[in-house]
Amino acid sequence: MQSAGIKANRGYNKPKGMYGGTVHHLAENRLNREFEVRQPNLWWASDITYIKTQEGFLFLAVVIDLFSRKIIGWSMSHLMTEDLTLAAITMAYSRRKPKKTVNLHSDQGSQYTSRNSQKLLEALNIQASMSRRGNCWDNAVSESFFSNLKKEKIQRRAFKSLAEAKQEVFHYIEMFYNPKRRHTYHGRISPVEFEKQYFENQKSG
């Protein structure tokens, strides 16, 4: 590589700053890497990633329905606070309107363990499950989505502003990933199409 003048395509450094917080509530890992889910609104997964821009880092929180791998809630901000995850969870609940208890799997970040987060989950009838500390494989579906986002949309992009990055992320989630991106997990069809077929089968059955 050196003689050919080729350099590895490395990711950028993690953002620095005081984004940590006090851990108030930890939940056991009830998901336990059982990522194959047979019905919607049974298990959701949530996580946070960051995207570099010339104005600073943009933080993205998502909520994924493990049944279809559809992004059902998301939020973006220049701050990685609990408001970021609360907004994503609230969007997911508003869109799905689940009639039964939902399980939400996340890491042990302070955004998910805070008192306000626990109050919201209780109010929405959502039960928490959390990865073991420092074990990203416990939330592999969320990590896989972020990997695809960065490989397919973010990699090698130099965003001039937070607004530009937000627009690109929005387009990827709502215009491509959910309605068009094919998944090997469910027969090479998109999350939207997978859910459509599921509900059609439910009606015909």
Image (tube, rainbow, N blue to C red):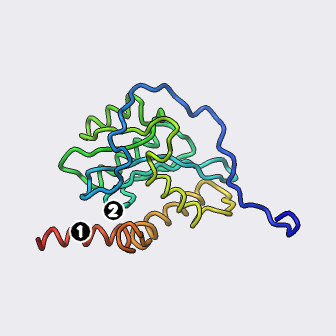
Label 1 belongs to which residue?
198
* Mark toward the start of the polypeptide (1 vs 2): 2
Compared across the picture, whether 167 is left or right of 89 comes to right
| Residue at x-position 29% and y-position 56% | 37
Label 2 belongs to which residue?
68
Q: Dot 2: within a 10 Å radius of its alpha carbon, few (fewer than 14), some, or many (20 or more) residues?
A: many
Compared across the picture, whether 128 is left or right of 74 comes to left
Viewer-side residue, 72 vs 171:
72
Compared across the picture, whether 40 is left or right of 167 comes to left
Do the numbered discs 1 and 2 sit on residues whose CB atoms are within 8 Å?
yes
Residue 58: x and y, percent? 58, 49
Residue 173: x and y, percent? 46, 63
Viewer-side residue, 138 vs 104:
138
Identify whether 114 is placed above or below 202.
Answer: above
User: Which image quarter is the C terminus in?
Assistant: bottom left
**Tag shown at residue 123:** none
Identify whether 169 is placed above or below 114.
Answer: below
Residue 157: x and y, percent? 67, 63
The mark total stands at: 2
Q: Amino acid at mark 1?
A: Tyr
Q: In which image quadrant can residue 118 be found?
A: top left
User: Which image quarter is the N terminus in?
Assistant: bottom right
Q: Residue furthest left?
A: 205
| Residue at x-position 38% and y-position 48% | 33
Identify whether 16 is placed above or below 197.
Answer: above
Compared across the picture, whether 122 is left or right of 47 comes to left
| Residue at x-position 38% and y-position 60% | 69
Q: Secondary structure at mark 2?
A: loop
How far, Cα to Cα, is label 1 from label 2? Answer: 10 Å
Q: Dot 1: within a 10 Å radius of its alpha carbon, few (fewer than 14), some, or many (20 or more) residues?
A: some
Q: Secondary structure at mark 1?
A: helix
Q: Amino acid at mark 2?
A: Ser
